[in-house]
Image: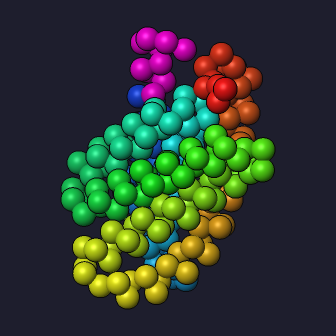
């Protein structure tokens, strides 16, 4: 896919990621793990990574984070969202490109969720100048296993259905 069609498809992915972020921000926070979210917008980053590649996935993640900050009005959310998106995208790219013979998209997604939560806890500890925040990391990492599994499962479904209709758009790792 080239030119304007590619740009439109990527714009749609940014819009879907933004919409999922907005919906997710309205969901009640679970009592078991405050701050934990499903990571629905990370699904869009993973799908973009599979379809287009790293550069496009990173661009979608960054644009989604910036636009969400403008829509929500929360400047601090930019730091959390951006750090999580970038680190998870980098790790998912490494796992997907080098270890896809070992890990399915579910595994790639779980690694992305783990990286996303680690980045957010790191940013929170730096912003608050309190490294005791890392004591909360095990709870978030445990939550990441479940949310990453769910996001990976849905991503497999979406990617398989996109392949049926748009097989020529997929990024080749080779």
Could you tell me residue 103's position as x and y percent? 74, 51
Q: Is residue 56 above or below residue 82?
A: above
Task: Give whichever of 108, 70 is nearer the camera.
Answer: 108
Residue 148: x, y in percent? Answer: 63, 59
Tell me the chief SS of the magenta region: helix
Residue 37 in percent (x, y) is at: 50, 65
The image's colour scheme reads rainbow
- Up the image or down, 72 lies above or below 12; here it is below
Q: Quadrant of the N terminus?
A: top right
- Residue drawn at x 37%, y 57% is 83
Residue 24 visible from this viewpoint: no
Is residue 160 or residue 174 the one in the foreground?
Answer: 174
Furthest toward the right, the residue is: 101
Q: Residue drawn at (42%, 58%), measured in percent from left and top?
A: 84
Residue at image location 29% in from the left, 44% down from the top: 67
At x 68% / y 35%, what residue is drawn? 159
Q: Is residue 58 left or right of residue 70?
A: right
Instruction: Choose top left, top right, bottom left or bottom right for residue 138.
Output: bottom right
The magenta stretch is 1-10
On the picture, is 141 further left or further right than 85? right
Q: Is residue 32 above or below residue 91?
A: below
Q: How far from the left and from the top, in percent, is residue 170?
A: 63, 24
Q: Quadrant of the C terminus?
A: top right
* Count of residue discs: 0
């Amino acid at each position: 896919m080239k030119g304007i069609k590619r740009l439109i498809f990527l714009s749609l992915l940014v819009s879907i990621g933004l919409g999922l972020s907005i919906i997710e921000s309205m969901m009640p926070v679970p009592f078991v793990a405050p701050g934990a979210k499903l990571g629905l917008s990370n699904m869009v980053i993973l799908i973009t990574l599979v379809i287009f590649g790293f550069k496009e996935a990173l661009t979608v993640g960054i644009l989604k984070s910036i636009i969400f900050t403008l829509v929500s009005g929360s400047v601090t959310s930019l730091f959390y969202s951006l750090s999580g998106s970038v680190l998870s995208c980098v790790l998912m790219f490494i796992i997907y490109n080098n270890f896809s013979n070992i890990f399915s998209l579910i595994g790639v997604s779980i690694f992305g969720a783990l990286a996303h939560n680690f980045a957010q806890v790191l940013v929170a500890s730096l912003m608050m100048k309190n490294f005791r925040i890392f004591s909360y990391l095990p709870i978030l990492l445990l939550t990441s296993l479940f949310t990453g599994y769910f996001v990976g499962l849905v991503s497999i479904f979406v990617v398989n259905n996109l392949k049926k209709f748009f097989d020529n758009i997929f990024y080749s790792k080779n």
